[in-house]
Image: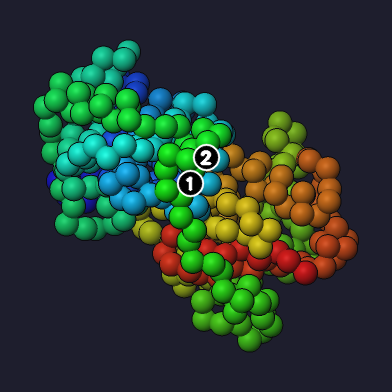
Amino acid sequence: MPYKSLAESILLAPAENGANKLCILTKSASPNMASWLLFNHIRKLKTFINIELIIDTAGSDGISVSAHEGFKGLHTMIPNFICSYIYESIPVYTNLYIWLKDDIPIVAYAGTAAFEQSDFLVKTHESISLYNTSEAWEQYQTAVNNSVYCNYAEVEEDVMIYQTPAISASIKKDCDPLHHRSDEVFLPLVTKRTGEPGIHSGLNWGQRKGRNPNQAYIPLPIKIAKSGFFPVDPIESPPHFSVVTDDKRHLILRVEQQNQKAITTPLSNAQLGEYFRNRLNLANGVFVTRADLERHGRINVRFVKIDSEHYYMDFSV
């Protein structure tokens, strides 16, 4: 199946045709892919489709702590999203995508495409095709009986959750914005015109009638947007990417708006505004001023690129 239509055909189109639940059994998965799919269900269907994701952590020797934190965050934030890990070593021969209508399986797909953005949103040699629905459902139920929810309090007793390589001291070091490294950028949180955060933009995006006052985005200068530093693919809905912050938070972000001028938390624009207001010791929903930023100690935020889907975000002083 051509890569441009893979995500559309397998992950979106059945919902547009009446299916209302997607069950996934996969050898590997990323929170960025789950976020992308949830976002696009809202964008296209104006509602969340029920998604159950089971990841073969037994066969893949566990799951990274960063991915685990990402899945837990989505599991908590989105009631329609459930993520589980296989803890018993059962054979998972292929990646399964099973669509249901009113809890009845109606169509299934199988193939080499794991639930990763690299398999669904990037041109690869992955393949996927129709699969026997009853056989797929039987395999999925076996996985259900040998899995545990990602937010189970004692999940680490059943599943190997391994540490990702630590953020190095050189990455954590906040360099001079005028002489920065090739793998980092500094994004301003104030406008060039006034030297203040925007009145109805940036950290104050939601400061208008009828909006959640916490809604916010990080302004992205056009030069950086066009540089390829962030994933801004020329597709209808660009990939999502993860950040680990200097205070050890995990966020999923996306570049959006006209001319790719904004970085947001796509499933809730208010999440980013809440994060920065918390860092600035401000109450939720209040208007952010330059004085607030200067009191914290900086008027920009630094990103260091680790790979195409993972970044370090630094707002430390």
Label 1 sits on a secondary structure element that is helix
The image position of residue 1, as x and y in percent, is 14, 46
Image quarter where the C terminus lies is bottom right
Whole-number angstrom distance, CA of label 1 to CA of label 2: 6 Å
215 to the left or right of 231: right
Residue under label 2, please give it.
Answer: 72
Up/down of 183 relative to 62, above or below: below
* Residue at (12% x, 31% y) in the render: 131
Looking at this view, is 286 or 280 the one in front?
Answer: 280
Residue under label 1, please give it.
Answer: 68
Looking at this view, is 185 or 164 the one in front?
Answer: 164
Residue 187 appearing in the image: no
Near mark 1 (Cα within 10 A), the count class, few <14, some 14-19 or many ≥20, is some
| Residue 146 found in image quarter | top left
* Residue at (57% x, 55% y) in the render: 263
Label 2 sits on a secondary structure element that is helix
Up/down of 76 relative to 228, above or below: above
Looking at this view, is 20 or 289 the one in front?
Answer: 20
CB of mark 1 within 8 Å of CB of mark 2? Answer: yes
* Amino acid of disc 2: Lys
Near mark 2 (Cα within 10 A), the count class, few <14, some 14-19 or many ≥20, is some
87 to the left or right of 124: right
Residue 153 appearing in the image: yes
- The label on residue 301 is none
The image position of residue 160, as x and y in percent, is 42, 48
* Amino acid of disc 1: His
163 to the left or right of 286: left
